[in-house]
Amino acid sequence: MRTTRRIFLEALGTTAAVGAAGAAAEESGPGLPPGSGESGQNKCLFWVAAGTPCDKSLKFEEGVYKDMLAYFKECGADGVVVLGTTGEFSAFSLAERKKIAETAFKYRNGLNIIVAPGTCNFPETIELSRHAAANGADGLLIVPPFYFKRPALEGLERYYSLIFEQVSIPINLYHIPGLSGVPIQHPLLRYLAKYPNLTGIKDSTGDSKGYQQFVEQFPNLNMRSGTDNNLKIALDHGMGAILQEGNAFTKEIAAVFAAKRAGKSIDEPLARMNTSLKLLRAAGVDEYGPMMYALSLQAGTHETYQRPPQLDVTDKQKTQVKQALQQIKQMG
């Protein structure tokens, strides 16, 4: 008989470690309908790969983060990923990463929260994972150890096993070889399938053929798309998405998911989303500075700043972003 997640948790005796908030989120995640979230049947959810706002002195801005989360919720996002690539996780210390995650939990307002705790080593990754679990995270998104490139499959199996054996909340693997240099491959997923809290992946390659193979080979997992070009494939297969574009295009992306859930054609909202993407990408919103500036204008927050090596928005880009947003507004 297949081991259920609840039996697995009870066997490890981790209820106290996960905490009341995490236990309450097991079935559906706070604020989501029954059968949704990391443990539920509804995998077709939209997470914003949230940016991390800093002030001019490059300190984390809790107040702006609070307003961002409220904006994402108001615009129809189902959840957020905290401190992923878009959240510039590698630019923050462990203490800062814990504080940022705690801020997300404090102001979640019903959003499903996935924390990205990955580092180059398993002790720190486990430390951040346990912190997220104890404070009420719905799940984790864990990048492979990314200093050593092309590690042996057995090495990755051992690395992730060390984490799975000590962390009981749902875990997703992060497939972003363009930055990590370490791809998530099918044999690794098959090996880790013995752990009942393996939930899925985020595929940020943009490779449609490779993503199609993921969703076909692992239909019981949530093979989330991390790029907008694979969004239709994800929805056609009942999968979710974690999108950087969600920062500047929250409403447009949420409308696509809303149409899908209502049983309507997604063609019209998808076309609108793509038109908006084209306009703002011409203004540079694939870069962190312009993306966060566009978000600040829409969410009504003040301008924030990027930690090096990312660059802040330029005056020229500000003008281009404003013009693009005005064009999108005129589309109705």
Image (spheres, rainbow, N blue to C red):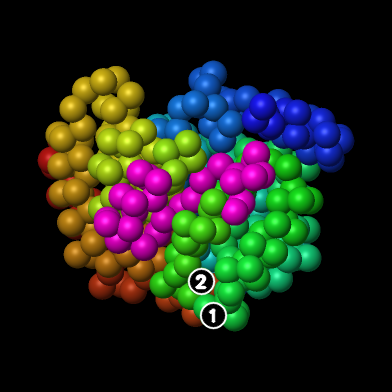
Q: Quadrant of residue 100?
A: bottom right
What's the amino acid at mark 1? Lys
Characterize the local packing of mark 2: few (<14), some (14-19) or many (20 or more) Cα atoms within 10 angstroms. many
Question: Residue at 52% across / 78% down in the picture?
Answer: 150
The image position of residue 18, as x and y in percent, is 78, 38
Among numbered discs 2 and 1, the one appearing first in the sequence: 1
The kind of residue tagged 2 is Val
Q: Is residue 260 left or right of residue 111?
A: left
Left or right: where 85 falls relative to 123: left
**Image quadrant where one finds the C terminus:** top left
Q: Disc 2 vs disc 1: Cβ atoms closer than 8 Å?
A: yes
Q: Residue at x 40, y 33 (%)?
A: 44
- The numbered dot on residue 303 is none
Real-space Cα separation, disc 2 to disc 1, in angstroms:
6 Å
Which residue is label 1 attached to? Answer: 149
Q: Where does residue 94 sit, x and y in percent of width and height?
A: 73, 65
Query: What x and y, as percent, mark residue 225?
Result: 38, 49
Question: Count the marks: how many?
Answer: 2
Which residue is more in the foreground, 44 or 292?
Answer: 44
Nearest the viewer among 291 and 40 is: 40
Q: Which residue lies under the disc numbered 2? A: 182
Kindly identify the residue that appears in the image at 71 percent across and 71 percent down.
121
The N terminus is located in which quarter? top right
Disc 1 crowd, CA 10 A, few/some/many (<14, 14-19, 20+): few
Q: Which residues are magenta?
A: 191-217
- Judging depth in this view, the residue of 225 and 81 nearest the camera is 225
Quarter residue 227 falls in: bottom left
